């Protein structure tokens, strides 16, 4: 299809409004109506109607003190919705790469699917001798520190939908074997805001896990590092925690979550 035929059904008013928003965003400052009019090549009366419509819909915000305009919350909302529509792995991959470089530990992203967690992104530390999980690997939620953090976003009713039986699934004994014990553990994790699992799933391997939340504050994924030690030394614990927490906050921010709102 040619460019001419592809543009045959343009809506001039919509085009002018979007053009004005784009140009205002490029200025990165509040502007008067006269300044806005000079940005777009349209009659003054048309520009006035465009500005009035955008203000009415919330895409422009007027400063009553200076009578100037800035981008409104509706524009920010569109941006947040777009970022939230992106895959967590796509948004988080560069962040966990940076986390790996700063912590010198292998880093992961995981999401929940039923009673399992699924690794959706991973990066290995240089020279790591740990048997790494692969993207797509599934593990039982209740057996892992990552799974516990994923469960921390559920209310009691949702939790019992995931685990309808009093005894947890699986034939081999794990760190917890009954639903109530797991629920109590997850509530402690939720109150703490993170999980440090030292040999919780695999002997000699520790992990630090923080939740990734979307715009409304719902836990949708977790970010973690894998520390090749049975117990994390006290002097290393706080610096490593801070790095993982910063990574989780950064990814959450990309998905539209405001730390101040959370």
Image: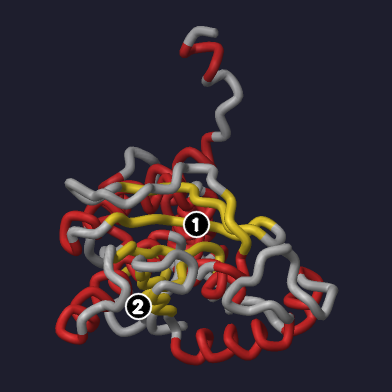
Q: Upstream in the sequence, badge 1 or badge 2?
A: 2
User: Does the residue at mark 1 contact the one at mark 2 (Cβ under 8 Å)?
Assistant: no
Furthest residue to the top? 2
Badge 1: residue crowd in 10 Å (few <14, some 14–19, many ≥20): many
Residue depicted at 47% across the width and 60% down the height = 80
Q: Which residue is mark 1?
A: 110
Q: Is residue 166 left or right of residue 127?
A: right
Residue depicted at 37% across the width and 48% down the height = 131
Q: Which one is nearer the viewer's eye here, 212 or 20?
A: 212
> Could you say which disc has been placed on residue 211 in the image?
none
Residue 180 position, x and y percent, is 72, 87
Residue 34 sits above or below residue 38 on the image: below
Q: Is residue 242 left or right of residue 185?
A: left
Residue depicted at 24% across the width and 71% down the height = 243
Q: Which residue is mark 2?
A: 63
Q: Which one is nearer the viewer's eye here, 7 or 90?
A: 90
Quarter of the figure with the N terminus: top right
Residue 45 position, x and y percent, is 44, 51
Q: Nearer the viewer, mark 1 or mark 2?
A: 1
Residue 244 position, x and y percent, is 30, 70
């Amino acid at each position: 299809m040619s460019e001419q035929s592809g543009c045959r059904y343009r809506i001039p008013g919509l085009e002018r409004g979007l053009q004005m928003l784009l140009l205002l965003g490029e200025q990165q400052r509040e502007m008067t109506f006269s300044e806005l009019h000079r940005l777009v090549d349209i009659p003054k009366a048309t520009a006035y109607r465009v500005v009035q419509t955008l203000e009415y819909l919330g895409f422009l915000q007027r400063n009553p003190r200076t009578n100037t305009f800035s981008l409104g919350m509706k524009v920010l909302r569109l941006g947040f919705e777009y970022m939230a529509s992106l895959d967590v792995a796509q948004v988080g991959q560069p962040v966990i790469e940076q986390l790996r470089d700063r912590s010198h530990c292998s880093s992961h992203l995981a999401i929940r699917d039923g009673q399992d967690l699924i690794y959706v992104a991973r990066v290995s530390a240089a020279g790591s001798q740990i048997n790494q999980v692969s993207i797509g690997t599934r593990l039982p939620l209740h057996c892992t520190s990552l799974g516990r953090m994923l469960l921390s976003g559920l209310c009691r009713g949702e939790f019992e939908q995931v685990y309808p039986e009093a005894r947890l699934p699986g034939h081999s004994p794990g760190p917890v074997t009954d639903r109530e014990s797991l629920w109590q553990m997850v509530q402690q994790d939720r109150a703490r805001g993170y999980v440090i699992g030292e040999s919780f799933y695999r002997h000699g391997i520790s992990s630090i896990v923080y939740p990734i939340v979307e715009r409304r504050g719902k836990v949708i994924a977790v970010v973690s590092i894998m520390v090749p030690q049975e117990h994390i030394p006290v002097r290393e614990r706080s610096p490593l925690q801070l790095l993982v927490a910063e990574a989780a906050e950064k990814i959450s921010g990309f998905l539209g979550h405001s730390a101040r709102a959370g």
